[in-house]
Amino acid sequence: MFDGSLTDASDVNQPSTLWKNKKKDDNATIHCSQTKGSGYYQMYWYRQLPGETMKQIVYTTTSSKEFFGGFNEEKFSVTKPNAESGTFTVKNLEPEDTGWYFCAVSEHSDTDTCES
């Protein structure tokens, strides 16, 4: 569940990636890291295709992942080896995959587990 505490862009590093030289059916991987701290271990990956709204593809932590909106591991994969970094891969590239892909992180919140 999103707790509303996404970091600002200065704490999340995602190198600008141009897949211009990739061929059809190649894979393309994006690396993302954050310097906010180990409490920010929740990572979100988004895509925005030309002329469309932004969509969340996957939410991941070091121990779980959840794909959204019909996205699945046949097309996309993620790794999250530690709180500070993760990768996102688009498999079997097609012209329709052209768009903007980016990551965001948020801090874990203990308020979701508190009892009244």
Image (spheres, rainbow, N blue to C red):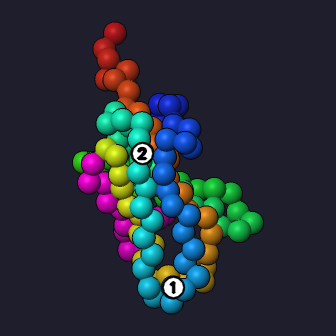
In this rendering, position of residue 106 left or right of residue 114: right
Percent from the top left, x then y, of residue 109?
38, 27
Q: Name the residue under label 1.
A: 22
Q: Does the image show residue 76?
A: no
96 part of magenta stretch:
no
Going by the numbered disc 1, the residue's amino acid type is Lys
Q: Is mark 2 on a helix, strand or loop?
A: strand
Q: Does the image show residue 15?
A: yes
71 part of magenta stretch:
yes
User: Dividing the image into 4 quarters, which one contains the C terminus?
Assistant: top left
Q: In which quadrant of the rendered view does residue 73 lie?
A: bottom left
Q: In which quadrant of the rendered view does residue 37 lie?
A: top left
Rendered image: mark on residue 34: 2
Q: In this view, does 65 lie above or below 106?
A: below
Give the residues drawn in magenta, as a range. 70-82
User: Dividing the image into 4 quarters, which one contains the N terminus?
Assistant: top left
Q: Is mark 1 on a helix, strand or loop?
A: loop
